[in-house]
């Protein structure tokens, strides 16, 4: 549900945010997502200026902070919003309700609900063209979704983690993804070998390239500390 501009500031803690040159998107443990238009004091015409030194400033003459209300409030998550990202007019949000939700920021309407995760969503990233999103979860999986397909269709699932996935990052051409979580290692996967999931109990169809162990004491005996990602 998208609400119009108004006094709908978060009533809980801000847990995550993303920003562009013109807007900020925030997620809160009050279950809401809010879109804010960035304020430019130099061009807005509001607040204190050098021509009005006695108005709107503190005793030192500094400008007063400007209070800005969100331009759009998105309601739909049932629990804390833990991660989000937006590209132009498309936003993806993930929460403790185990859902990745996709929103049209022009209309405030939810366009997709991605439902395959069985525990809370901890991280996500969108491609630059906003066609795909990758999400990581406390259910120990990483899932790749194609937003051009209706429903909650996903392209691939990574099941190499033994504990919760906390962070992920992929390169712009979607060749490799790096993931990390509650295990003492960082894992790298080749996403060019995607073939889809053959069953909930199956292994990942994407190829594990290598593992990095920041603390070598936790590494296997045959671990090469100079191991590098292939080009």
Image (cartoon, rainbow, N blue to C red):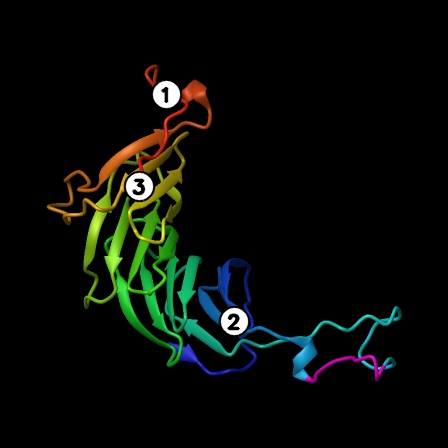
Q: In this image, 13 relative to 60: left or right?
A: left
Q: Nearer the viewer, mark 3 or mark 1?
A: 1
* 77 up-or-down from 227: above or below: below
Element under label 1? Answer: loop
Residue at 22% from the left image edge and 67% from the top image edge:
148
Residue at 28% from the left image edge and 40% from the top image edge:
189
| Nearer to the camera, 23 or 181 | 23
Q: Distance between the residues labelled 2 and 1?
A: 44 Å
Tell me which corner region of the image, top left, top right, bottom left or bottom right, holds residue 37: bottom right
* 169 up-or-down from 92: above or below: above
The residue to which callout 3 is attached is 140
Q: Is residue 96 magenta?
A: no
Q: How crowded is mark 3: few (under 14 residues within 10 Å), some or many (20 or more)?
A: many
Element under label 2? Answer: strand
Q: Where is residue 215 in the image (x, y as percent from the top left)?
A: 46, 24
Question: Given contact means CB atoms under 8 Å apart, are the residues at marks 2 and 1 in contact?
Answer: no
Q: Distance between the residues labelled 2 and 3?
A: 32 Å
Magenta-highlighted residues: 45-52
Q: Which of marks 2 and 3 is in front?
A: 2
Q: Where is residue 99 in the image (x, y as percent from the top left)?
A: 31, 59
Question: Given contact means CB atoms under 8 Å apart, are the residues at marks 2 and 3 in contact?
Answer: no
Q: In this image, 188 relative to 5: left or right?
A: left
The residue to which callout 2 is attached is 23
Which mark, residue 53? none
Q: Distance between the residues labelled 3 and 1?
A: 25 Å
Of callouts 3 and 1, the N-terminal one: 3
The residue to which callout 1 is attached is 224
Q: In this image, 128 relative to 117: left or right?
A: right
- Check the picture and name the quadrant holding the C terminus: top left
Q: Position of residue 86 (x, y in %)?
A: 41, 65
């Amino acid at each position: 549900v998208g609400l119009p501009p108004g006094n709908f500031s978060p009533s809980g803690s801000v847990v995550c945010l993303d920003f562009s040159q013109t807007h900020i998107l925030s997620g809160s443990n009050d279950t809401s997502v809010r879109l804010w238009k960035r304020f430019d004091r130099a061009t807005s015409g509001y607040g204190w200026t050098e021509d009005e030194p006695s108005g709107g400033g503190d005793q030192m003459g500094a400008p007063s902070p400007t209070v800005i209300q969100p331009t759009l409030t998105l309601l739909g998550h049932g629990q804390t919003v833990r991660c989000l990202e937006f590209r132009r007019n498309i936003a993806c949000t993930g929460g403790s309700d185990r859902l990745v939700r996709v929103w049209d920021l022009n209309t405030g309407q939810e366009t997709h609900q991605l439902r395959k995760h069985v525990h809370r969503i901890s991280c996500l990233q969108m491609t630059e063209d906003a066609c795909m999103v990758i999400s990581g979860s406390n259910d120990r999986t990483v899932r790749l979704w194609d937003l051009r397909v209706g429903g909650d269709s996903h392209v691939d699932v990574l099941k190499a983690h033994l504990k919760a996935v906390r962070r992920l990052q992929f390169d712009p051409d979607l060749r490799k993804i790096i993931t990390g979580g509650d295990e003492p290692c960082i894992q790298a996967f080749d996403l060019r070998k995607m073939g889809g999931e053959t069953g909930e109990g199956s292994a990942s169809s994407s190829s594990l390239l290598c593992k990095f162990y920041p603390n070598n004491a936790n590494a296997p005996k045959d671990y090469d500390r100079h191991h590098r990602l292939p080009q």
